[in-house]
Image: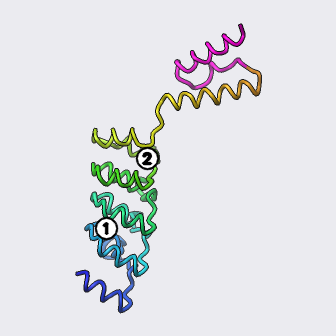
Amino acid sequence: MLDIAELLCEFGANVNYSSGVFFGETPLHFAAMHNDYALIELLVRHNANTHAQNFAGYTPLHFAAQNGNEASATALFLSGADLNTREMYCGYTPLHLAVIGQFEHTVKAMVFLGAKINQSDYCGLTAMDRCKSKEIRKFLLASKCPRMSSLESDCLSVIRERIRKTSRIRGFDSLPLPFTLKRKLKLEITRKEL
């Protein structure tokens, strides 16, 4: 099949042709869906659009992720595909689809390549929120999610700086912060006043 595709490309076939018979997929969509790495390379070499979207807004990378095709996803990314493009109905990114399908190797590859872990879909849910696999959840938690201690530290330093600049130490109780942070601030402020 690759020989035929190569011959068609050499004779000027439109590698970005989108058929209305299906859902607007291009040859690159089908190559990604079937994990045909060699065909992806051939199409990209002949200027196939890695950002092409079908009628639902799925890019070839969405198809690769949805089917757990790690090699195709990596090849598409290295050819310029955007890891964080949302499809138009639910707002799923390729990472959402890989997580929903529980394709651990594809998820790991996409995160390694720079997919945004905290990007939400149209329901406001991140890939982590949609995750049902313990292994993938553990990996996502360990990846780029800040630890609570560093997040807590960042919150405290911002509040301390604000208090230092305004010389106001009242009102922190009304901040939408966890009780433990409010208690820590109160102790710090009380010590400074003494």
Taking the magenta stretch, the answer to whether it contains residue 191 is: yes
Q: In what quadrant of the picture does the C terminus appear?
A: top right
Say if 117 sits above or below 59 in the image: above
The residue positioned 27% from the left and 71% from the top of the image is 36
Q: Position of residue 183 (x, y in %)?
A: 57, 15
145 horizontally vs 105: left or right: right
Give, as a three-letter code, the residue at label 2: Ile
Give the residue at the far top of this rendering: 194
| Res 160 → quadrant | top right
Instruction: Please report whichever mark, 2 or 1, sits nearer to the chain's N-terminal start.
Output: 1
Q: Secondary structure at mark 2?
A: loop
Q: Residues within 10 Å of mark 1 (few under 14, many from 20)?
A: many
Say if 85 sits above or below 51 in the image: above
Say if 66 sits above or below 159 in the image: below
Residue bearing mark 1: 32
The majority secondary structure of the magenta stretch comes to: helix
The residue positioned 64% from the left and 15% from the top of the image is 188
**Residue 184 — which label?**
none
The residue positioned 25% from the left and 81% from the top of the image is 2
Query: Residues in magenta?
Result: 169-194
Q: Position of residue 169 (x, y in %)?
A: 71, 18
113 horizontally vs 63: left or right: right
Q: Position of residue 106 (x, y in %)?
A: 31, 54
Q: Nearer the viewer, residue 145 or 15?
A: 145
Give, as a three-letter code, the residue at label 1: Ala
The residue positioned 58% from the left and 17% from the top of the image is 184
Taking the magenta stretch, the answer to whether it contains residue 153 is: no
Q: Secondary structure at mark 1?
A: helix
**Residue 117 — which label?**
2
CB under 8 Å between callouts 2 and 1?
no
Q: Position of residue 131 (x, y in %)?
A: 33, 42
